[in-house]
Each structure stands twice: as C-alpha cells, then as structure tokens.
Image (spheres, rainbow, N blue to C red):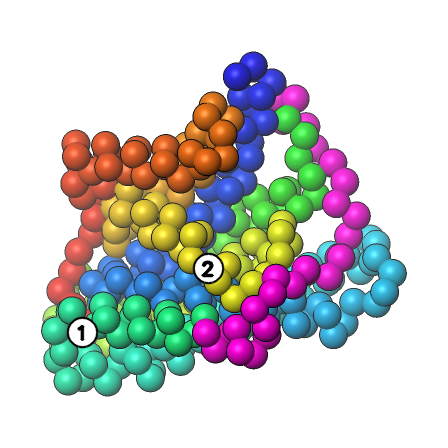
Amino acid sequence: MSLSEFWDFLVLGVVLGSLYAVIAIGYTLVYGVLQLLNFAHSEVFMFGGYGGLLALTALIPETTPTGMGSVGYVLIGMLAGAALGGAVAFGLERVAYRPLRRRGAPRLVFLITAIGASFFLYNLAGKLFGRNPLPMPTMYENTKVLSVFGAQLTVTQVLILVSAVAMMVLLDYVVNRTKMGSGIRAVAQDPDVASLMGVDIDKVVSRTFVLGGLLGGAAGFLFGTNSQVWYTMGFLPGITAFAAAVLGGIGNVRGAMLGGLLLGVVETMTVGLWGDDWRYVGAFVVLVLVLMVRPTGILGERLGRTA
C-alpha cells in the first residue's frame, strides 16, 4: 500500500466508522438502561433508509436540485429517516419489550423477542417496499469537493462525516448535560433508587429507545445516499455496529463512538491490504484481540441493574 492509498483508505475508514458509531449508540443506549441487546435496531436503521427514500421520491423533481434546494432535500431526507426510525423504535419498546419488562421476564426472553422482532420487521419491509434494492433519488451532483492529505472526498462522504459527527456531539451533550440525560444515567445506574427519586422509568426507557431510533434512522438515510436501500440492508452494518459497541465498552456512549471509528478504519485498511473478501475479518479479529486483553472494552462498560 502506497502512502497515497493509505490516506485514501484511512479517510474512507473514518467516514464509514462514523456511520458505525451512530448506529452503535442505539445499541449501547438501550443496553445501558435495560441490559437488553436490541438486535432489532438494525431494522430501525433499515426503516430510516426507507423513510428518507419515500419522502424524497415524493418531493424531488426530475431534474437534479442545486444550491439551497439540495441542502433542503438532504435535511428533509434525514428528518424523515430519523422520524420513521424513532417511530419504529418507539413501537418496538411499547409492543415487544414493555409487556415483558412489566412481567419480569428473563433476559433470554428479551433476546429471543428482539431476534423475532428483527425477522418480522425486515420481512414486513420486504412486503411493503419490495425485495429489490431501490436507488435514493438524486439530491445533488456527487462531485469531489475536498482533499485530505491527497485523499479526495465526495459530497456524499462529506455529508456522512459531518452529519455523523454532529449527531454524536449532540447525543453526548444530551446524555451528559440535559435533564433527560440525567434521567437516562440515573435509571442505568440504579432504577429502583431513580424511581424513589421521582424518575418515571417507563418514560425514560421509551425516550431512550426513541433517541436511539432517531440516530439509527438518520444513519439509515445517510447509508442509503451512498448506495441503495433494500429490506435487509441493516444486517451487516447492524452486526458491525454491535461489535463496535462491545469493542468500545457496551453501555458507554463514548465507547460506542470510539469503537465505531476504530472498526471502520480497520475494515477499510483490511480491504486495502488483502482485498474485499477479507473486509469483515480484520475488524472482528481486532474485536477478539481487544476483548482478550480487556473484556469490558476499550473504555470499559457502564452497567446498571435492569430497569
């Protein structure tokens, strides 16, 4: 690998890793509050892609928008993806998980329910939207606009990176600096004491799901802008993002961000060195090696009792 190729793959890895980080936050938020591995979060991501696709298909004219029109359509697509992702996450919590929590179901039942919900949602999407990949409507001319150490970034890559970083910064602020974030952290630490202090556990859990769903849905739209949207598109990014959450420290929001960026870089560097067939091998080898040395992840997991 030449030096110029190294920078190309590094920049691509940071862009991809930022997407993984946003998705991983959804896993780590829910786990931090409920100690639940919400494997249906990958389908929240997928529905976000369809949300943006449907909104833009209805609005974008036949000609390619330019200028502020392009900016407006990007914002509409992201908001539509986030809204549908948040709605699906809210529905999951109310229909699939809340009844189990109120009945004191074992954790294994939650896990089985999450897997079942995942199968249901992606088959529902296949039935509603078809099983063939659908291209995202053209919102702008995807030209090269930025050079970083010789690596050329397109409009789509800059959009993904800037949007993902902005969402991560905003989420970190919400969790650590707002009243809602204080409730989430209190419930994650000790739900019984939080309840005695006046925290509404059901509201906190519901808001946690919605918050993760908003981010996951927006990430689904961003992923779709770089490729296409299809009913199983959440599987591989979802698995990789879950691995990123574990790598950074499951239940640790900043750990999920760090893990996502690291796995994205390792994945693209693996492709550069050994080819696309080894894309996911390098990332998961790094995951195993790190967990052998530090089982709680890079930044350490933050665990509470189940809400």
Q: Nearer the viewer, residue 20 or 164?
A: 20
Magenta-colored span: 123-150
Instruction: List x then y, in percent, for residue 167.
Output: 50, 54
Q: Nearer the viewer, residue 181 or 246?
A: 246
Q: Nearer the viewer, residue 149 or 281?
A: 281
**In this view of the protein, can residue 236 be seen by the observer?**
yes
Instruction: List x then y, in percent, for residue 189.
Output: 17, 61
Q: Which residue is mark 1?
A: 109
Query: What residue type is disc 1 on?
Result: Val
Task: Determine crowd level at label 1: few under 14, some 14-19, many 20+ residues with C-alpha closer than 10 A.
Answer: few
Query: In 3D space, how far apart are the residues under numbered discs 2 and 1 (Cα atoms)?
Result: 23 Å
Q: Is residue 134 magenta?
A: yes
**In this view of the protein, can residue 197 be seen by the observer?**
no
Task: Determine crowd level at label 2: few under 14, some 14-19, many 20+ residues with C-alpha closer than 10 A.
Answer: many
N-terminal-most mark, 2 or 1: 1
Q: Which residue is mark 2?
A: 234
Query: What residue type is disc 2 on?
Result: Gly
Q: From the viewer's perspective, is 185 left or right of 126?
A: left
Which element carries disc 1, helix, strand or loop? helix
Q: Residue at x 66, y 35 (%)?
A: 153
Q: From the viewer's perspective, is 267 left or right of 51?
A: left
Q: Residue at x 48, y 62 (%)?
A: 232
Instruction: List x then y, in percent, for residue 290.
Output: 24, 34
Which element carries disc 2, helix, strand or loop? loop
Position above or below: 279 against 66: above
Q: Residue at x 33, y 63 (%)?
A: 39
Instruction: List x then y, in percent, for residue 253.
Output: 33, 51
Position above or below: 231 against 96: above
Question: Which residue appears farthest toward the right when viewing the image?
Answer: 63
Using the image, tell me which numbered label, if any, was put on residue 190: none
Position above or below: 267 against 119: above
Image quarter of the C terminus: bottom left
